[in-house]
Image (cartoon, helix red, strand yellow):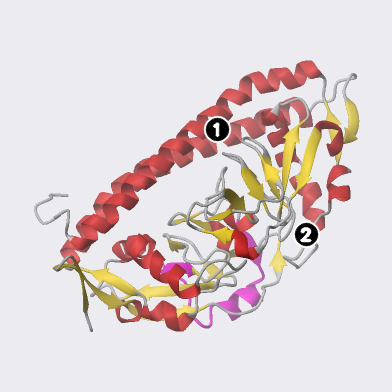
Amino acid sequence: MEETIFKAKGRAVMKTVSLIELCYSVTDCPHSTPKWTNAGKIVIRNQNIRNGRLDTSSVSYTTQEDYDKRIKRALPNVGDIIITREAPMGEVCMIPDNLECCLGQRMVLLKPNKDLVDNNYLLYALQSPYVQNQISWSEGTGTTVSNLRIPHLKKLQIPIIELIKQRKIAKLLANLDKKIAVNNEINDNLQQQAVALYQQMFTDSHEPDWTDGSLSDIADITMGQSPSGSSYNEDGIGTIFFQGRAEFGFRFPTIRLYTTEPKRMAYTNDILMSVRAPVGDLNVAHTDCCVGRGLAAIHSKTNRQSFMLYTMFSLKKRLDVFNGEGTVFGSINRSSLNDIPVLIPSNGAIENFERIVAPMDAAIRNNYDEICRLQEIRDSLLPKLMSGEIDVSNIQL
């Protein structure tokens, strides 16, 4: 195993080795789209991987036949690591226990050599600024879609230390991730309660004074428009820019890009809806932002954003029609979105829902803010732990 020693200010900081030396295999996924089905074998896609986690709350499915074809190159096993190649690139997660799945497009399966590297440590190392900067530097920024090539992926330099220290670092960081996971579970539970309440109040009921209308009757809709690619940057210059579904999280999108030439804007608490590949996925803008052509921004005409959000959740099946069977290249235009049929309850019913659910949505936002702070702490600790600036030798876990 060939080691490289990086120095800063004349002193050794950390030893590194190439990723391929730490893995039994680095296998690219099949370069084809599986046949999509409503049930069957799970297909992991880029949108299921965020912030080092695998989110299986909204997975896609394929047939047994397509599954068998896709696992011929490599079968995902517990402890294996997935890294995305593009849209976005560099996101990672680990295969958990009791998950039978195959990989979609634009991702790579890593099988770590456990005699050389702790797989949890490797997962954190791949998320470190040191490794992520290698990925970004190689592919550059300022293009709509960046691609992580397999030869470069294999050459990524991974900070390496003794296995016992790797395991201690992984456990320390996992403690922070456990708190993050608790907050995520609370948020998921709050959202499920709100969805159930919406269904009880509005889907399973229909009062005489409620009317039928269209989405444009209750919402102002802004279709996104992408700025010039030359205006994009990852340096925090200009306006936060969300291109499409790739940046979506559980409730709020991840900030990756900025633009100095914003075209169309969404504002804090506006609903962000994917209008392309696939149609209908939702997030909420946690700050003012520019929206690209893959998104629409939706704002309640009466500023009842909680009611508006759960109305959009309730329209998922209607919006799925625009995806088309067996394809991921669906889209919806402004006219079709404006004309989506909706039930418009009375003002009193909407106010009652808003009174109950708006505080729940505020709690989700507060939990999200705490998650962001914990992630910042974790990410600031990571390079110090890997370089030895913080010594874990005497820490008992």
Q: Residues within 10 Å of mark 1 (few under 14, many from 20)?
A: some
- x then y, percent, for residue 21: 30, 81
| Residue position marked by numbered label 1 in the rendering | 190
- x then y, percent, for residue 111: 38, 75
Does residue 105 show up magenta in the picture? no
Residue range highlighted in magenta: 59-83
- Give the camera-side residue of 360 and 296: 296
- x then y, percent, for residue 332: 81, 55
Q: Quadrant of the N terminus?
A: bottom left
Tell me the distance, in whole angstroms, between the alpha carbons under discs 1 and 2.
28 Å
Residue 162 visible in the shown view: yes
- x then y, percent, for residue 353: 69, 22
- Give the camera-side residue of 194 and 243: 243
Q: Residues within 10 Å of mark 2 (few under 14, many from 20)?
A: some
Classify 238 as above or below 67: above
Total numbered badges shown on the rendered structure: 2
Looking at the image, tell me whether mark 1 or mark 2 is earlier in sequence order.
Answer: 1
Residue type pointed to by label 1: Leu
- Identified at 90% across, 33% down, the residue is 213
Residue type pointed to by label 2: Asn
- Identified at 13% across, 50% down, the residue is 395
Secondary structure at numbered mark 2 = helix
| Residue position marked by numbered label 2 in the rendering | 323
